[in-house]
Amino acid sequence: MFKRVLVANRGEIALRIIRACRELGVESVAVYSEADVDSMHVHLADEAVCIGPASSKESYLKPDRIIAAAEITGADAIHPGYGFLSENARFAEICATSGIKFIGPSASVISMMGDKATARATAVANGVPVTPGSGIMVDAESALKEAKKIGLPVMIKATAGGGGRGMRPCFKEEDFISLFRAASNEALAAFGNGECYLEKLVLNPHHIEFQVIADTHGNFIHLGERDCSMQRRNQKIIEECPSPLLSPELRERMGKASVDLISAIGYENAGTIEYLVDEAGENFYFMEMNTRIQVEHPVTEEVMGCELIKEQIRVAAGEPLSRHVLDASPRGHSIECRINAEDPYNNFCPSPGKIDLWYAPGGKGVRVDTHVYSGYTVPPHYDSMIAKLIVTGATREIAIARMKRALGEFMIRGIKTTIPFQLEIMNHPDFVNGTYDIGWVTRYLEEKKA
């Protein structure tokens, strides 16, 4: 096992990793920007190192500063969390060159599956269904010609995208050029790579992802699916496990495809394979693979009875997957709400600032993952998520009732949050009945304006 793990991230995921390290008897090192000096992960780590100013480009996205922090603190492994450098193959290479274990897959696998266009080709080569699409398109004019061949509507996607960035749906030919350039520019600013590709747009789809994990001892498994269809502008708002849409037969087919794919590429550590499922709930199409832990991993943990962050660390240290993970089976239903510092009734405008009062819900089946507290100031420089509220019940109906109760118990003063909007969703018949898709939030908001 490692002696000391550096956490190359911030916020709730950094705190989550630090806690996992402590339970494994491993020391932790936090890195932080000047804006995050008061974040809880800085206080709870065994050691903390400032790596630069507030801007991510000058701190959390600086591999040299993170490696230097690891070397001066004697860290023998780095956990990247999600976002930032978590799917950066070059960073994984630098870690290996520096003699520091990257807690994740190899750089070559990150390159293969982290690049969306290459990942599609890999899926095709291994018999996983994909939607019609293109290779990498370097300019808008040639991309438009390809879009006409595929047939509109299409989804323009950045090959290095993630978190909904660098994605634009296009329904009209006259809008294509501007949408392509917008997606490319957004991806260039966020990831340093503006290359895009096209996919045929599946109308009214469901976003289903399978949690996979593999070790170096020949174990390749999946831990069920999550339904992430409740989203706004490609940003997930609510996730649940298992999906209310999937039939046992479709679940089995998608699970097998996921395991076959990670086995074929020799995958190691945790990852997520994302699919679109058509409106009828009969056909599925590979979208992409995230070669890292996901924001919504807690719903899988609660339903499958495992701790994925601990398993990531153990696998990276050369240990086999735990027996309880290999033998995991679903129990109950779990729902996660991402609590964002945004005003849902002002076009989801970010709401940074000081939290005057923070009271989190509790009770049976309630879990809150967060790094904030009363008196904490939410900085304006990063993603607006400040907490994840996860509830679990024996049935989906119990989980929904528990989520409504827990959302109602939250007391946050000083900033606006998405909690009122999420309560609206919990009470809506479409969510209660499980009859929602990726476009539901957009349609709902438009109906409210009318």
Image: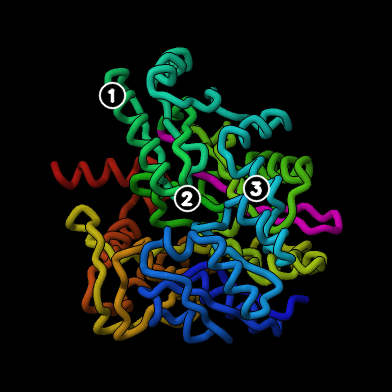
- Mark 3: secondary structure: helix
Residue 437 appears in view? no
Placement of the C terminus among the 4 image quadrants: top left
Give the farthest residue toward the left.
450
Disc with the residue nearer the chain's start (1 vs 3): 3
Magenta residues span 204-221
Residue type highlighted by circle 1? Asp
User: Which residue matches tag 1?
Assistant: 175
Residue plotted at (24% across, 66% down): 351
The residues bearing labels 2 and 1 have C-alpha atoms spaced at a distance of 28 Å
Name the quadrant containing residue 80. Answer: bottom right
Name the quadrant containing residue 27. Answer: bottom right
Mark carried by residue 259: none
- Mark 1: secondary structure: helix
- In the rendered image, residue 424, in percent from the top left (x then y), is placed at 28, 59
Disc with the residue nearer the chain's start (2 vs 3): 3
Residue 200 appears in view? yes
Residue type highlighted by circle 3? Ile
Residue plotted at (34% across, 48% down): 232
- In the rendered image, residue 310, in percent from the top left (x then y), is placed at 67, 72
Residue type highlighted by circle 2? Cys
Q: Is residue 336 above or below residue 112?
A: below
Q: How many marks?
A: 3
Q: Is residue 211 magenta?
A: yes
Which secondary structure is most common in the magenta stretch? strand
Q: Residues within 10 Å of mark 3 (few under 14, many from 20)?
A: many
Report the mark closest to the observer, 2 or 3.
Answer: 3
